[in-house]
Image: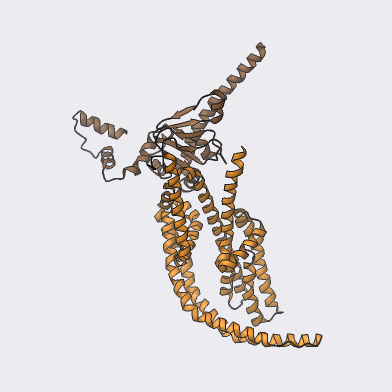
């Protein structure tokens, strides 16, 4: 629930009088609550608003970005993409859950999957950025699920039409990736130290 | 129930998708009266989309951006055209009037040639062939003149239809694309989206480059001919720009009318004729060495032999239209084959 929705509900619950001035958040709430407005159109920006990834986006930028997303539906156990396939899509889980697995992992450790993604999780961000990206895992819909995807062609057009939105989007992705890279480097250095210690103790 | 099985559903989706695509393709093939302006409008919209995209950077909506382009083209093309049409019709009139002159010229040249051959070899060439040829030409020209109203009718239809289609294709391309993608089956979605995107980009870039190339070559030739103060400068430049769209063969087609008209007006060996020929040579050198390497060759990565063969095949089946669209068609086929090749070979080997 967004902030204006909450504030309106709270003031209504405590029997407070609503302000005499034009209350923009109130108007916005009423506008968005309009039963005639197309709900499906609003759902993508609303969904994206809930993501930590896009916290730096303004409402208008979010509206522009949302236009470039595609809504995809997958039935139970349908394959979203396979390991080592060439990929171009970056997906968010809108509803349902997605299972990531790797055949190699299965044969080595006997594990079936290494990650289950729920609502608001995302996967496949490397495919959007890398040239000729090959999927590093297989993604299968665990149950009937809806995904929201943005693809390389969309990003190309977004860069040409709305460079600022595109830059913000890529920056958000870069933050996620650099965080991950930082953790990886940290882990790798720890591992290297451990190997050194092991070698010394031998 | 068949629909309960997940695998059946995805199969049915795939079949449904293929049927819709096949239906659309057959409609396009069956109705050439609609499909020709529609495909021209599609090509135009692709060539104009970079301009729309850069206009949208200024926070303009797509409709406004499209309208701006249309107003600009109206001013930039229609206004000069209105001024050009009297000149063009004047020039065509004059060319028509000089047809007997051409005939006379050919006859006299033939006589000279025959005398020359007789002197050298002692044989006399019959002139039956020549008369037959001239008669055929006259008949053909007469038939052409009679059919002009027909051409004009379809031309006027096109003049209204093409901008109309182009406007809506540009304005609504995003929603068309979303609609098409919304019923694309999941199993081929990413690959299909990527292929149509690359295909559209290649086609758009190719025709944008060709448009610029035609403007440059036509402009250079028109200005040069005007400076040389040659009759029919504008119409010759226009023809050169149009024929330049056809690769390899086009420049030769473009210079032919100039040679014929130059021969009649100034004679084969005059200095003006030399100037005209060198002007065409200069325009084509500019095209080959400066415009082509920067614009066209980067976009269509095809071997020259394949280009030549595809132009010949295109002209055989669809005439001049075939010559123009053969190259992007071949580029598209190459793209699809490469994509299928990658699918079959590269992935399995990993």
Q: Which chain is brown?
A: A
Q: The orange chain is which one?
A: B
Q: Is residue B97 left or right of residue A31?
A: right
Q: Residue A202: x percent and y percent? A: 67, 12
| Residue B72 visible in the current orientation | yes
B265 vs B156: above or below: below
Is the image coloured rainbow, by chain, by secondary structure, or in one colour?
Answer: by chain
Q: Residue B274: x percent and y percent? A: 70, 75
Which image quarter is the C terminus of chain B in? top right
The one of B6 and B296 positioned closer to us in this rendering: B6
B94 vs B309: above or below: below
| Residue B218 visible in the current orientation | no
Quadrant of the rendered structure where residue B97 is?
bottom right
Residue at the far front in the pictured view:
B1
- Residue at 43% x, 62% y: name it: B165
Q: Residue A48: x percent and y percent? A: 39, 37
- Residue at 53% x, 27% y: name it: A106
Which image quarter is the N terminus of chain B in? top left
The one of B149 and B76 positioned closer to us in this rendering: B149
The one of B72 and A38 positioned closer to us in this rendering: A38
The one of B164 and B34 positioned closer to us in this rendering: B34
Quadrant of the rendered structure where residue B171 is?
bottom left
Q: In this view, does B17 lie to the left or right of A8?
A: right
Residue at the far top in the pictured view:
A201
The mark tally for this picture is 0
């Amino acid at each position: 629930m967004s902030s204006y929705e909450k504030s309106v509900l709270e003031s209504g619950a405590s029997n407070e009088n609503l302000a005499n001035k034009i209350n923009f958040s109130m108007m916005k709430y009423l506008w968005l609550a309009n039963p005639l407005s197309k709900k499906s159109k609003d759902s993508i920006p609303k969904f994206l608003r809930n993501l930590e990834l896009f916290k730096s986006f303004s409402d208008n930028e979010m509206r522009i970005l949302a236009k470039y997303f595609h809504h995809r539906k997958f039935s139970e156990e349908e394959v979203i993409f396979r390991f080592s396939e060439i990929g171009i899509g970056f997906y968010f889980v809108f509803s349902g859950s997605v299972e990531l697995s790797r055949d190699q992992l299965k044969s080595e450790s006997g594990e079936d999957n290494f990650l289950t993604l729920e609502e608001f999780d995302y996967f496949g961000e490397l495919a959007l950025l890398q040239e000729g990206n090959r999927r590093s895992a297989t993604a299968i819909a665990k149950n009937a699920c809806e995904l929201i995807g943005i693809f390389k062609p969309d990003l190309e057009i977004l860069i040409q039409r709305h460079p600022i939105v595109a830059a913000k989007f890529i920056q958000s992705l870069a933050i996620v990736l650099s965080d991950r890279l930082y953790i990886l480097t940290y882990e790798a250095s720890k591992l290297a130290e451990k190997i050194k210690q092991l070698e010394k103790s031998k | 129930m068949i629909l309960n099985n997940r695998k059946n559903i995805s199969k049915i989706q795939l079949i449904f998708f293929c049927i819709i695509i096949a239906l659309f393709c057959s409609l396009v093939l069956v109705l050439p009266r609609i499909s020709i302006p529609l495909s021209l409008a599609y090509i135009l919209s692709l060539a104009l989309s970079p301009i729309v995209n850069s206009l949208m950077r200024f926070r303009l909506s797509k409709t406004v951006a499209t309208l701006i382009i249309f107003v600009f083209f109206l001013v930039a093309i229609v206004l000069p055209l209105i001024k050009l049409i009297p000149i063009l019709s004047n020039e065509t009139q004059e060319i028509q009037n000089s047809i007997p002159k051409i005939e006379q010229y050919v006859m006299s040249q033939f006589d000279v040639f025959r005398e020359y051959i007789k002197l050298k070899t002692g044989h006399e060439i019959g002139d039956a062939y020549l008369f037959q040829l001239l008669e055929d030409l006259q008949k053909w020209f007469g038939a052409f003149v009679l059919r002009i109203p027909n051409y004009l009718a379809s031309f006027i239809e096109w003049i209204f239809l093409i901008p109309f289609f182009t406007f809506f294709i540009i304005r609504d391309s995003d929603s068309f694309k979303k609609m098409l993608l919304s019923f694309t089956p999941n199993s081929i979605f990413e690959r299909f989206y990527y292929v149509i995107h690359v295909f559209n980009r290649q086609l758009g870039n190719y025709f944008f480059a060709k448009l610029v190339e035609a403007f440059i070559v036509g402009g250079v030739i028109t200005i040069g001919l005007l400076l040389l103060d040659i009759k029919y400068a504008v119409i010759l430049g226009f023809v050169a720009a149009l024929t330049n769209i056809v690769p390899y063969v086009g420049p030769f087609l473009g210079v032919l009318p100039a040679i014929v008209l130059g021969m009649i007006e100034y004679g084969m060996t005059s200095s003006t004729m030399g100037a005209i020929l060198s002007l065409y040579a200069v325009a084509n050198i500019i095209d080959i060495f400066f415009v082509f390497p920067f614009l066209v060759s980067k976009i269509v990565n095809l071997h020259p032999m394949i280009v030549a063969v595809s132009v010949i095949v295109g002209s055989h089946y669809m005439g001049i239209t075939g010559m123009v669209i053969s190259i992007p068609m071949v580029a598209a086929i190459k793209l699809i084959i490469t994509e299928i090749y990658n699918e079959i070979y590269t992935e399995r080997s990993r």
